[in-house]
């Protein structure tokens, strides 16, 4: 998928708007957009793996949580400043993904998903157990930094990086190899693609980005709690957003995350109980009617003419 | 002491096994990971709770109701919703059942609030001593019921025509079709059966543990463990897996500590998935 | 460039943008003057703290109702009614934090009533700290919340680390004096803090802690842990708890026939659910509180302690527990601070800073207990009492001056009930 110059202009305008927005908008909107960017980033990071290799990672929150907690621990226990701490955490997350991926990626489909879920839950318990370092059930308090514009830009920057990486996936030989794995792994092997190598790289990159977002999140929230930071619900939201928008596409996670986060924002304050039900219906709807996601919907319209 | 710990493990293991067997059956035949499984447990538990609270019906007597209601629900869900994606890639069924579980769990949350409830009949907690062991009546009874339900399921699959048709479909769908078996019907019946058995397990659970709308999730994880260890789609394996989980949990909590126990369970699940995805008997289904 | 593709992309982007700007609802102009005080509160209506959150909301509403019945808070001769805006934080810390931001920047809340549980207070208080909006809460007293040097967080509860004092005090007066104590708690801030308190005060009063274990919050079946505790045969069982945990402990203790001489729970047994769901099995448990019908406190708004308890029971049908008592006290604390500093709504940053100063200097008596905050924001003014459930109702058994009924010790064994 090559980007035309018109689309590029639109994208640049949007980015420029996003870049100057913090100057004009108030605290609440700043926070809201930062949240939306965070979720676009998370959905996008999952998409790098699941969308392009077809491996459904039910434990992706583990890398988010590892990024968050490592950043927290490094800053609190070792007094490290934010950027190095975050980078180290992200690299750690990526590295762990590769390590875990070597045995786990031999599994297919549902088994891979369950194995990753087990991994994420185990990570949560590890953080709880080793409470001397992580604060365990008491939670971890990070140094306070209230420059919320910083976090806005941090999330935005990360999202742009992820989009860039996704674009590269879409257009590179590497990315095409991944998609071949997604469509028919055995056939891909036969044509000489080193599938394990490719899968691991994709996994590592995807975890790396999740780790970055986790690190930013930790500093932003100032307070980490294992049950929330490693919650399977976070993985679920990532998955829903990626598929709602259209997994394996560039715009998919962006649209899916923006759409879902916005709906949540409108609904949860007023319809406290029902919004999750609506999300459930959206998921069912997407699976039954729009399996290619919203992006797929637009594409199909083009083909239909 | 060790004996008591083991006994506790066996008793709870039986109940855990019953929780997982429906999941295993559904995967074995329909090849889908049924995330709504947790909600089936929850609904079974709530049926028992409400019958007890509002009409004073003894929990054990409520079991036929759970069975029937969950059967109907399972059948309808499969026939009209899940059947549409039966041929689609796994991700779809995962997502679909996840969406359904969101809907059901949150409808329950609206209807019944997030409060934790207890089924506490007069005889709850009553126990008897056997040598140095304390055996709670309720745990013993629910465990026995759980085993009976699983035995019933097993025999049904083995001895009845319908059961054999189900088995045939799971092994070779097209071959079964040639024999005159209609896969779509089989799928609906199997799903209904799996849901119904899970409903019974939910009722049994309610007698020992709290009942609340979001309870499905925790038991779902345990079910994963049990069916992976026992072998996906292998019913006797579910019993073994359940017992292993129960005993492991009991032993480990006693001698190592509760937190480590959870880690151990997940590490074990992980190891089994990597090295023996077909389960300890090797009879589980692998892609 | 394919025109169709451009059109479609354009449509997509317009769709996204329009959704975003759809959110630009009416922009409220800043009010130069307002006729009422607006309090904001993010509190659990759903989720694991649904019941407790609803109870806490009742406490805040109780205070607001009484104040408004008098016409409002009186400042400089004029009365300003009180309005509390509530949002459901779903028992989730991240949601509570988001809501805090909304309440302060969008809804223009003057002051904040805190959410339920230390989990939610922790991160959401960073928002109030940043905006310099005083928050009074009555549901998050884990010690770790108050070591952060926050100036705008106030808690009318005593530190959870100290809650254990009255239990141990009471037990040490029994004869024969109990010798051994077992402490268990799930791994979350409040329970861990209570457990720490139990251990420290047990040692202080000369008891031996024979078992001390924490377990994951998700664990439903705690019989293995209770089994371990039973094997050590302690005289007293102490549990860091709220309602759900307490219910499980009682139910499963009965199942394995574990009979300590006393049960101490840090929270959750006074909620009506506990006695309702457990029936007879709920008897004899201990829980702390801050008042008793016989407590000598009184104030112009609530009347005497006994009257306050009666009125609360009449309005809501339940006995106010520690959190609710302190929730009401928190409302009065705000009221006093506002009146002393002579602040009129809406509160600007400068006024809020003054409110905060008044709060830090506060030293008042209310029917819901005295309020005096220490430098970290915790209340150190209110004495602690202990309640025991007898015949399904909580009665005060300590301190001696406030006693309504005698403490039943040792507790009858399960088989004898």
Image (cartoon, grey):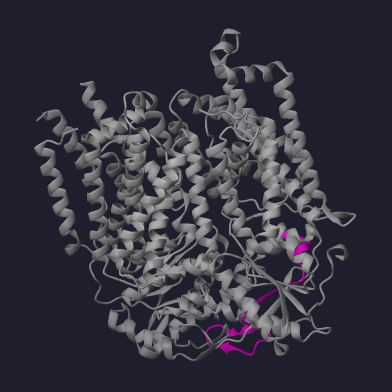
Residue under the point 30% across and 70% down = A81
Q: Is residue B206 above or below residue A30?
A: above
Does the magenta segment cover residue C174? no
C155 horizontally vs A190: left or right: right
C315 horizontally vs A286: left or right: right
Where does the image place residue A104, in percent across and percent down from the top left?
46, 40
Residue under the point 71% across and 42% down = B243
Where does the image place residue C396, in percent across and percent down from the top left?
71, 80
Name the quadrant of the N terminus of chain C: top left
Q: Is residue A134 above or below residue B49?
A: below
Name the quadrant of the C terminus of chain C: bottom right
Residue C85 is drawn in which quadrant?
A: bottom left
Does the magenta segment cover residue C294? yes
Residue C280 is drawn in which quadrant?
A: bottom right
Magenta residue span: C278-306
Q: Residue extending furthest right?
A: B131
Residue under the point 25% across and 59% down = A154
Q: Nearer the viewer, residue C45 or C140?
A: C140
Residue under the point 26% across and 31% down = A176
Q: Nearer the viewer, residue C165 or A185?
A: A185
Q: Is residue C290 visible?
A: yes
C54 horizontally vs C148: left or right: right
Q: Nearer the viewer, residue C34 or A298?
A: A298
Q: Nearer the viewer, residue B215 or A147?
A: A147
Q: Is residue A270 above or below residue B93?
A: below
Q: Is residue B25 above or below residue B252?
A: above
Where does the image place residue B251, in percent across and percent down from the top left?
71, 54
A294 horizontally vs C232: left or right: left
Where does the image place residue B228, in percent across and percent down from the top left?
59, 37
């Amino acid at each position: 998928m090559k980007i035309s110059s018109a689309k590029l202009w639109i994208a640049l305008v949007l980015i420029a708007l996003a870049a100057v927005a913090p100057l004009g908008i108030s605290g609440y909107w700043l926070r809201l957009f930062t949240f939306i960017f965070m979720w676009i980033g998370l959905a996008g990071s999952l998409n790098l793996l699941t969308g392009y290799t077809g491996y459904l990672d039910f434990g992706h929150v583990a890398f988010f949580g590892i990024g968050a907690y490592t950043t927290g621990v490094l800053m609190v226990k070792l007094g490290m400043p934010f950027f190095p701490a975050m980078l180290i955490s992200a690299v750690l997350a990526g590295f762990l993904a590769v390590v875990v991926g070597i045995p786990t990626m031999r599994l297919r489909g549902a088994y891979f998903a369950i194995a990753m879920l087990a991994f994420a839950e185990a990570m949560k318990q590890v953080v709880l157990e080793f409470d001397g370092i992580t604060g365990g059930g008491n939670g971890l308090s990070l140094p306070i930094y209230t420059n919320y514009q910083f976090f806005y830009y941090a999330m935005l920057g990360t999202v742009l990086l992820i989009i860039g990486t996704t674009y590269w996936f879409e257009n590179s030989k590497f990315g095409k190899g991944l998609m071949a794995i997604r469509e028919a792994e055995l056939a891909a092997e036969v044509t000489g693609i080193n599938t394990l190598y490719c899968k691991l790289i994709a996994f590592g990159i995807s975890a790396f980005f999740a780790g970055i977002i986790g690190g930013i999140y930790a500093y932003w929230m100032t307070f980490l709690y294992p049950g929330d930071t490693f919650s399977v619900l976070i993985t679920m939201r990532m998955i829903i957003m990626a598929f709602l928008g259209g997994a394996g596409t560039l715009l998919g996670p962006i649209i899916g995350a923006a759409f879902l986060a916005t709906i949540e924002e409108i609904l949860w304050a007023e319809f406290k109980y029902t919004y999750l039900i609506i999300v459930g219906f959206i998921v069912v709807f997407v699976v039954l009617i729009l399996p290619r996601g919203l992006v797929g919907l637009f594409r199909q319209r083009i083909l239909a003419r | 002491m060790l004996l008591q710990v083991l006994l506790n493990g066996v008793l709870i293991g039986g109940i855990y096994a019953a929780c997982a067997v429906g999941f295993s059956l559904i995967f074995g035949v329909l090849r889908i990971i049924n995330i709504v499984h947790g909600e089936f447990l929850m609904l079974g538990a709530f049926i028992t709770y409400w019958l007890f609270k509002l009409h004073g019906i003894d929990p054990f007597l409520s079991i036929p109701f759970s069975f029937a209601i969950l059967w109907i629900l399972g059948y309808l869900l499969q026939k009209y919703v899940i059947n549409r994606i039966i041929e689609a890639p796994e991700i779809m069924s995962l997502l679909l059942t996840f969406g359904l579980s969101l809907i059901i769990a949150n409808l329950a949350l609206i209807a019944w609030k997030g409060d934790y409830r207890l089924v506490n009949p007069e005889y709850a907690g009553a126990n008897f001593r056997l040598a140095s062991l304390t055996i709670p009546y309720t745990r013993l009874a629910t465990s026995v019921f759980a085993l009976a339900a699983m035995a019933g399921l097993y025999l049904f699959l083995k001895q009845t025509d319908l059961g054999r048709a189900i088995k045939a479909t799971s092994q070779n769908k097209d071959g079964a079709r040639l024999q005159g078996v209609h896969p779509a019907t089989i799928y609906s019946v199997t799903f209904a059966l799996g849901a119904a058995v899970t409903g019974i397990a939910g009722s049994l659970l309610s007698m020992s543990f709290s009942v609340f709308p979001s309870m499905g999730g925790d038991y779902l994880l345990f079910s994963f463990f049990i069916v992976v260890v026992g072998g996906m789609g292998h019913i006797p394996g579910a019993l073994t897996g359940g017992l292993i989980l129960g005993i492991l949990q009991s032993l480990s909590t006693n001698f190592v500590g509760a937190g480590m126990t959870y880690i151990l369970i997940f590490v074990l699940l992980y190891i089994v998935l990597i090295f023996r995805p077909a389960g300890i008997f090797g009879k589980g289904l692998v892609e | 460039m394919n025109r169709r593709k451009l059109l479609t992309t354009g449509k997509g982007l317009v769709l996204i943008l329009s959704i975003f700007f759809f959110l630009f609802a009416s922009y409220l102009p800043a009010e130069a003057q307002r006729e009422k005080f607006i309090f904001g509160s993010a509190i659990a209506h759903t989720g694991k703290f649904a019941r407790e959150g609803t109870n806490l909301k009742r406490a805040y509403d109780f205070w607001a109702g009484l104040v408004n019945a008098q016409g409002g808070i009186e400042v400089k001769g004029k009365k300003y009614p009180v309005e509390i805006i509530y949002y459901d934080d779903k028992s989730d810390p991240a949601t509570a934090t988001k809501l805090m931001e909304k309440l302060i920047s969008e809804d223009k809340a003057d002051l904040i009533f805190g959410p339920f549980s230390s989990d939610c207070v922790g991160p959401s208080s960073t928002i109030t700290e940043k905006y310099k909006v005083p928050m009074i809460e009555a549901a998050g007293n884990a010690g770790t919340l108050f070591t952060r040097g926050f100036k705008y967080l106030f808690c009318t509860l005593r530190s959870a680390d100290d809650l254990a004092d009255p239990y141990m005090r009471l037990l040490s007066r029994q004869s024969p004096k109990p010798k051994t104590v077992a402490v268990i708690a799930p791994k979350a801030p409040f329970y861990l803090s209570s457990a720490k308190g139990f251990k420290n005060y047990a040692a202080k009063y000369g008891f031996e802690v024979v078992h001390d274990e924490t377990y994951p919050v998700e664990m439903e079946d705690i019989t293995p842990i209770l089994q371990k505790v039973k094997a050590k045969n302690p005289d007293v069982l102490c549990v860091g708890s709220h309602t759900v945990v307490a219910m499980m402990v009682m139910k499963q203790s009965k199942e394995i026939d574990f009979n300590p001489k006393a049960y101490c729970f840090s929270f959750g047994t006074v909620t009506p659910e506990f006695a309702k769901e457990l029936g007879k099995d709920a008897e004899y448990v201990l829980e702390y509180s801050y008042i008793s019908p016989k407590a000598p406190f009184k104030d112009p708004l609530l009347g005497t302690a006994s009257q306050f308890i009666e009125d609360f029971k009449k309005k809501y049908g339940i006995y106010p527990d520690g959190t609710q008592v302190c929730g009401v006290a928190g409302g009065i604390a705000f009221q006093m601070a506002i009146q002393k500093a002579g602040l009129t709504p809406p509160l600007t940053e400068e006024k809020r800073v003054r409110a905060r100063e008044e709060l830090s200097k506060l030293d008042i008596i209310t029917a819901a207990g005295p309020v005096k905050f220490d430098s970290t924001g915790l209340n150190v003014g209110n004495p602690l009492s202990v309640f025991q459930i007898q015949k399904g109702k909580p009665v005060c058994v300590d301190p001696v001056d406030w006693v309504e009924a005698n403490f039943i010790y040792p507790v009858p064994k399960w088989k004898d009930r």
